[in-house]
């Protein structure tokens, strides 16, 4: 086991009240990485930092300090990046696509977590199948991956025009379902919903011919990469080592993870299966899922200026199936 104390020269700071108003900040020192991530993020980065795996790799490309901004919603991560307060961040796939289409200059370093399992759940006495949702009410978050999943499931069942789609704040969904104001809802943690007594009637994995999973991409600013040649390779070497370390010490990993996420320890292997951490930085499957999601966002008039997903995948991490001419070279 690596000793995290060996790397005390690296500054790891957590600033919870992030970026009030996202005002433009002065550039960080060239040896500092400003890293942001979403709430309950359980990818490989935090483990790589905790185990002292990431720091020596970053030192090879001139980075000696890590400033971490944890627990930030994906849209706010885009705002922070636009304001110049983040260099690298893990985000949702929909915000990444929206940010790129809006002109944010970042590229894909890896898909840190794949196969995020979107699901539909109901009350214990609710509909028993997707087909029984005809005439029912389902809330979605506009432009989210969960919205994409719900629309895909309903369309496949031929009932999209027979279900009432609502907009509802995420914090109000469960109470509304229990009161009977809505009839079903989506979740990316079906195991938690089942533990609460709800019944899951559909999962993304039930649809073999549709790309309905979510993904958590890791994005890096183009300007930052130009300052640190070799960063992508260094990060992904550390990531591959961290995944191997997680696979070798799963109990220790989940014990550690239980201290930083809000879910019960016994559910963590199901919520965050190690198989969702693919050592290959970007797979052809993930590119297909992002492309399908982007087309959905275009159809919904949420993404107005799309660019091919392949155009922001650096050549060194592109799947072999992508044409080299379609991707940018990294600095």
Image (spheres, grey):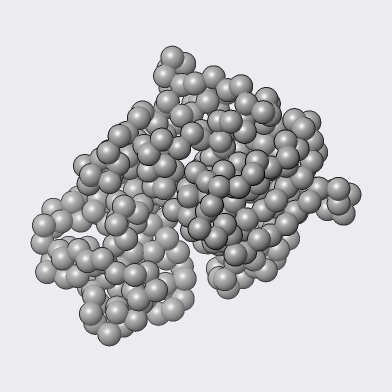
Name the foreground residue: 184 vs 57. 57
Q: Is residue 4 left or right of residue 17?
A: right
Q: Residue at x 46, y 21 (%)?
A: 327
The image quarter in which residue 290 lies: top left
Can you say whether 262 is above or below 318 in the image?
below
Instruction: Locate residue 71 relative to residue 30 in the image: left or right.
Output: left
User: Closest to the observer: 242 or 80?
Assistant: 80
The location of residue 169, given as percent across then percent down, is 34, 70
Image: 228 above or below 157: above
- x, y percentage for residue 239? 66, 41
In this view, the residue in front, 49 or 252, is 49
Q: Residue at x 50, y 58 (%)?
A: 21
Q: Is residue 184 above or below residue 205?
A: below
Task: Give the camera-side residue of 247 and 149.
Answer: 149
Residue 115 image position (x, y, % from top left): 45, 48
Q: Residue at x 46, y 16 (%)?
A: 324
The residue depicted at 35 percent of the width and 76 percent of the height is 172
Residue at the limit of the structure toward the bottom, as seen here:
179
The reply to whether residue 325 is visible in this rendering is yes
């Amino acid at each position: 086991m690596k000793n995290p104390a060996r790397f005390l020269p690296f500054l790891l700071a957590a600033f919870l009240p992030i970026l009030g108003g996202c005002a433009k900040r002065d550039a960080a020192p060239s040896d500092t990485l400003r890293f942001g991530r979403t709430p309950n993020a359980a990818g490989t980065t935090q483990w790589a930092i905790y185990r002292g795996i990431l720091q020596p790799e970053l030192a090879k490309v001139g980075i000696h300090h890590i400033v971490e901004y944890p627990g930030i919603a994906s849209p706010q991560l885009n705002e922070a990046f636009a304001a110049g307060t983040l260099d690298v961040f893990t985000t949702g796939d929909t915000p990444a696509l929206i940010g790129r289409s809006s002109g944010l200059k970042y590229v894909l370093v890896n898909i840190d977590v794949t196969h995020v399992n979107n699901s539909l759940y109901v009350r214990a006495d609710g509909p028993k199948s997707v087909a029984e949702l005809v005439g029912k009410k389902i809330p979605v978050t506009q432009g989210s991956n969960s919205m994409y999943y719900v629309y895909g499931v309903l369309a496949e069942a031929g009932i999209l025009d027979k279900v009432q789609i609502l907009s509802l704040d995420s914090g109000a969904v469960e109470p509304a379902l229990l009161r009977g104001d809505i009839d079903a809802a989506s979740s990316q943690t079906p195991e938690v919903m089942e533990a609460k007594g709800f019944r899951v009637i559909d999962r993304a994995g039930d649809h073999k011919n549709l790309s309905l999973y979510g993904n958590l991409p890791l994005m890096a600013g183009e300007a930052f990469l130009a300052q640190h040649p070799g960063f992508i390779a260094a990060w992904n070497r550390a990531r591959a080592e961290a995944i191997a370390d997680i696979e070798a010490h799963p109990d220790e990993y989940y014990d550690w993870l239980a201290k930083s996420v809000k879910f019960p320890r016994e559910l963590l292997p199901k919520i965050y299966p190690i198989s969702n951490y693919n050592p290959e930085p970007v797979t052809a499957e993930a590119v297909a899922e992002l492309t399908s999601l982007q087309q959905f966002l275009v159809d919904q008039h949420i993404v107005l200026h799309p660019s091919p997903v392949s155009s922001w995948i650096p050549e060194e991490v592109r799947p072999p199936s992508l044409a080299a001419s379609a991707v940018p070279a990294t600095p």
